[in-house]
Amino acid sequence: MSPEFDFNSLTTYVRWSVALLGAFAGALWLALVVWTYRDMRARSRDLFAQLLAPMVAAMLPIAG
């Protein structure tokens, strides 16, 4: 007799894993935007550039 596999517990583990990875990715993305804003404020006095840089980092997180 083979042991039965519980798909409900597997679904729960997968759902929690995806949620935790999504939360980590979201926190990393937000930290990238904040870091870009602070870095641009330190480098430039131009208000337009200070606002544009974090918006670009927010829209293009991989290239940011």
Image (cartoon, rainbow, N blue to C red):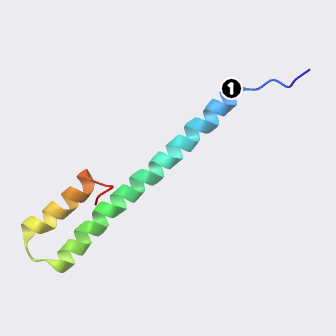
Name which quarter of the figure residue 48 lies in.
bottom left
- Residue 29 is situated, as x and y percent measured from the top left of the image, at 36, 56
The number of numbered discs placed on residues in the rendered structure image is 1
Q: Looking at this rendering, what residue extends furthest in the front direction? A: 63
Disc 1 designates what residue?
7
- Disc 1 residue crowd, few under 14, some 14–19, many 20+, Cα 10 Å: few
Q: On the rendered image, what quadrant is the N terminus found in? A: top right
Name which quarter of the figure residue 35 lies in.
bottom left
Classify mark 1: helix, strand or loop: helix
Q: On the rendered image, what quadrant is the C terminus found in? A: bottom left
Q: Residue at x 68, y 26 (%)?
A: 7
Q: Residue at x 52, y 47 (%)?
A: 20
52 above or below 6? below
Q: Amino acid at mark 1?
A: Phe
- Residue 19 is situated, as x and y percent measured from the top left of the image, at 51, 42
Residue 5 relative to residue 58: left or right: right
Name which quarter of the figure residue 62 lies in.
bottom left
- Residue 52 is situated, as x and y percent measured from the top left of the image, at 14, 61
50 above or below 56? below
Q: Residue at x 23, y 67 (%)?
A: 37
Q: Looking at this rendering, what residue extends furthest in the top direction? A: 1
- Residue 56 is situated, as x and y percent measured from the top left of the image, at 20, 57
Residue 9 relative to residue 52: left or right: right
Q: Residue at x 14, y 63 (%)?
A: 51
Residue 2 relative to residue 35: left or right: right
35 above or below 43? above
Residue 7 relative to residue 52: left or right: right
